Image: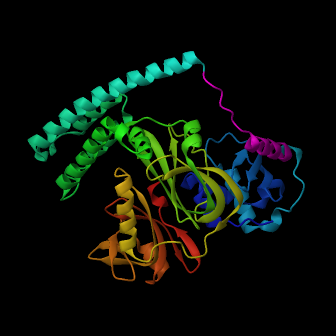
Amino acid sequence: MSIQLTSTQVLAMAPDASSASAAKKTANLKHWSQIGSNAGALWGICQGSASYQVKVDLTSLKATCTCPSRKLPCKHSLALLLLAATEPDALPESEPPMWVASWLQKRQADSKLTKTDQPSSPSSQTAQAKRTEKRQALVSKGLDSLDLWLHDLVRNGLASVQTQPASFWESRAAQMIDAQAPGIANRLRNLAAIPNASRNWPEKLLFQLGLLAMLTHAYRRIDQLDSALQDDVRQMIGWNLSQEEVAERGQTVTDEWLILGQMVVDEDRLRVQRTWLLGKESKRSALLLQFSAAGTPFPEIYPLGTAQKAELLFWPGAYPQRARIISRQGEAIPITTSLPGEEAIDNVLAKVASTLARQPWLERFLCVLHNATPILHNDSWYVRDSAGKALPLAKGDYWQMLALSGGHPIDLAGEWNGENVLPLGMLSNQTYYLLGRALQ
């Protein structure tokens, strides 16, 4: 059998460069026995320092291996996928052995399980109400203090923060943690990087302070907001929704989703993975977030640069963007056709403006341009549309993108943050190339 993924796309799933290198060495038939496949899975036994049973679900690309590695996927799982991509005849279709069949049966049973909500007892409801009331009081008191601090900061002039250390912002963030408003604390920590970082830093800082003040005022008047925007405000303050609440109130969308790119960044002692998807028919963008603490692997694997039919569940909000995959159907196949993007940069910016009118605190947007050209001008990189309008690219070198384009128009997927575009991937000559993995 053969899988639709290329070896490049398989290696892009590796958690780090050392895993990719080890997988390439392990993808040699001399290390393998009992390898086989069927319509839904791959399997084999890899002989290393011991014998390891390796299994891969082709629909979700969930892989399990009996090796002790904490990396996900491990080198053995990647190597098996590499063999399927490069030497498909080596994995003949056959009946799975018992250790694979039992695993497949368990996965199928798990996917059919439905969670039933048990009604909470009156006593637990009363206790929950008391905890909520207590937290609301703490948040309100913390926001009162924050508003006074913001007022003094602006009244004294932004020049007063030019020489302040990071602890100036951290101490205020710690107070918001004590007030059980961690979302506000994260925004305050992000402000510490603005002073002196650019020529127009006062303008950027004042803008972010304004957004912060608007958020505190919105929380106090939350009953006057639309219900969808109420969800956004609560979540930005730090009231997280449970998975049950998301399932009950979120929207599901089934489409063929293009998995356009991914990046991993460090945020407050956590590793955060952002994966961007675009619906082929709906043209709806989706942001999949995963978090890792203390070096633990991210739980889900997404084959970048592929398309796969799937059902997504979106978090409720005025402009639902964050989502998670509920189910996948069929195999992921490489992206080879034009991306459903915009021809004109003006259209992209108009959509961003419309989105911000509904949810003014969004910070990132999926930007997909059709027939755009990467250019270098005065030592700065841009992407230009057919009308001659251009957007700046995030700081970096993009010679590879220019070389792959050959100076001709391409389809580009990137993340727009209001100032520049961070390229995620590009389509040229019916081949999708990943561009945004360097941040890992």
Q: Up-down: is 96 above or below 382? A: above
Q: How far across and down, in percent of the image, does residue 141 sit?
A: 28, 26
Examine the image and state in which quarter residue 109 appears: top right
Q: Up-down: is 180 above or below 81? A: above
Horizontal side of residue 236 vs 123, given as left or right = left
Is residue 175 at all visible to an observer of this figure? no
Q: Residue at x 36, y 56 (%)?
A: 356
Horizontal side of residue 148 vs 118, given as left or right = left
Q: Up-down: is 156 above or below 341? A: above
Examine the image and state in which quarter residue 439 appears: bottom left
Question: For the N terminus, which image quadrant?
Answer: bottom right
- Residue sitting farthest toward the right: 95
Q: Is residue 22 magenta?
A: no
Examine the image and state in which quarter residue 174 appears: top left
Camera-nearest residue between 21 and 6: 6
Is residue 56 at all visible to an observer of this figure? yes
Camera-nearest residue between 218 and 7: 218
Horizontal side of residue 193 vs 407, given as left or right = left
- Residue sitting farthest toward the front: 224
Q: How far across and down, in percent of the image, does residue 305 sit?
A: 58, 65
Q: Which residues are magenta?
A: 100-120
Q: How many marks?
A: 0
Camera-nearest residue between 54 and 361: 361
Q: How far across and down, in percent of the image, does residue 409 sit?
A: 45, 81
- Residue sitting farthest toward the top: 123
Colour pattern of the rendering: rainbow
Q: Residue at x 28, y 32 (%)?
A: 143
Q: How far across and down, in percent of the image, does residue 288 sit?
A: 53, 51
Q: What is the chief secondary structure element of the magenta stretch?
A: helix
